[in-house]
Image (tube, rainbow, N blue to C red):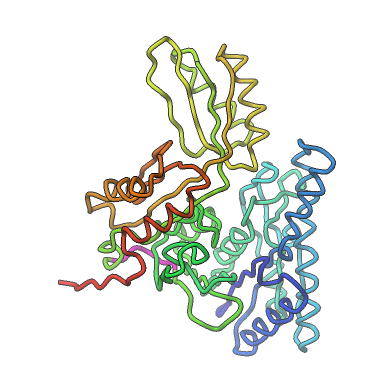
Amino acid sequence: MRNIVVQKYGGSSVANTGRIQDVARRIVKFKRLGYKMVVVVSALGGTTDKLIELSRQITKYPSEREMDMLVSTGEQISVSLLAMAIHKLGEEAISFTGSQVGIRTDSSHTKARIIDVNATKILKELEKNRIVIVAGFQGVSLKQEITTLGRGGSDVTAVALAKSLNASVCEIYTDVDGIYTADPRIVKNARKLDKISYEEMLELASLGAQVMQPRSIEIAGRFKIPLHVRSSFNDKKGTVISEEVKMMEKVVVSGVTVNKNEAKITICDVPDKPGAAAHIFKVLADKNINIDMIIQNISRTGATDVSFTVNRDDLLKTIRTAKEISDKIGAEGVTSDDDIAKVSVVGIGMKTHAGVAAKMFTALAGKKINIGMISTSEIKISCVISRKKAQDAVKALHKAFNLSKKAIVKER
């Protein structure tokens, strides 16, 4: 079956019934142009946060299984309302949960990974000339338990469906016109990118750019799924995410990101002996806690501090686990700091250009911004800084790398 288009609409795009009806009109327009439409929808804007807040009024440490039962309800509201809005416009539509369309996941509650998608039911409905609407962010485990895919998981749902259906394109609709060189709410002269590589977008998403979920980019890049990020509030062309091209390689830095949703944990005076670090990070992994940056100080007294960063949503869980680790290995205790931010510069051209780190550190020093931790890869440099300095850092780096102006590259 050809001409299948997968579209994903985020919470801001379906924040209320008025916007849901706007989305319905856009979908119907595509349908009447001859496309087979599969639509993935997030919960109404703010719904998931409200559900999480309700759980916190009950307990600080809710069961992860019950959290999945709770937060997965948000998408059921939005898909059914969208189906009703499409019916009102005279087109046939049918809504499904992730479980109903066969999105199979592992058993990692709140952060499940998709194992398989059985697209048979969707294809049958498309053959009936219906618009298929799927609840994003959710699936079902092999044990028949409802699971969710983590923050931004609707992006993962959309890309996985696009792959399974061999869709011609996967469009991600959001409240901005595409991918920018920095958050335009922070940097007023941030520039929209026409194109960006999967590799760069994966780094930007992983480092705090909230337009797309990192795992969705990873899947799209692996299977070469065309992605188009655009606004649900206008018809402008957005940003195309594709494979690396020569033009991209010549642009040293493509964007600056900031992530204020991180916290630093330090296990103090860890005995300096083989296997200590392995034990720490194995226990954290077993608890399904994702670690970002790691620093281990050089031992001078037979003990060393081990610091690492995690998502702030995992802070309480991580502190509790770290204290258990500390007691078991004979460390001196645990400290935490959630008043941090991670600022990063990303660009595929960094592979072949020197001096990016020096320019970055100089720009931060010029604003008297102290660096707590540093992490690098071939195409990015990240620094942990004080949270209150985050916006100043983004502005300084955007200016230092002259990102407001489009690079003009002459091919030889």
Task: Name the quadrant containing residue 241.
Answer: bottom left
Q: What stretch is highlighted in magenta?
A: 241-245
x and y percent of residue 300 in the render? 37, 13
In the depicted structure, whether residue 172 falls above or below residue 255? below
The N terminus, quarter of image: bottom right
Tell me what residue is drawn at x 39 percent, y 40 percent: 375
x and y percent of residue 254 in the render? 36, 61
The C terminus, quarter of image: bottom left
Query: Can residue 283 be found in the magenta stretch?
Result: no
In the depicted structure, whether residue 135 falls above or below residue 292? below
Tell me what residue is drawn at x 36 percent, y 48 percent: 364
- The residue furthest left is 412
Tell me what residue is drawn at x 65 percent, y 47 percent: 112
In the depicted structure, whether residue 320 falls above or below residue 260? above
Tell me what residue is drawn at x 44 percent, y 49 percent: 343
Q: Nearer the viewer, residue 21 or 256?
A: 256
Q: Which of 307 and 34 is in front in this view?
A: 307
Query: Left of 378 or right of it: where is 3?
Result: right
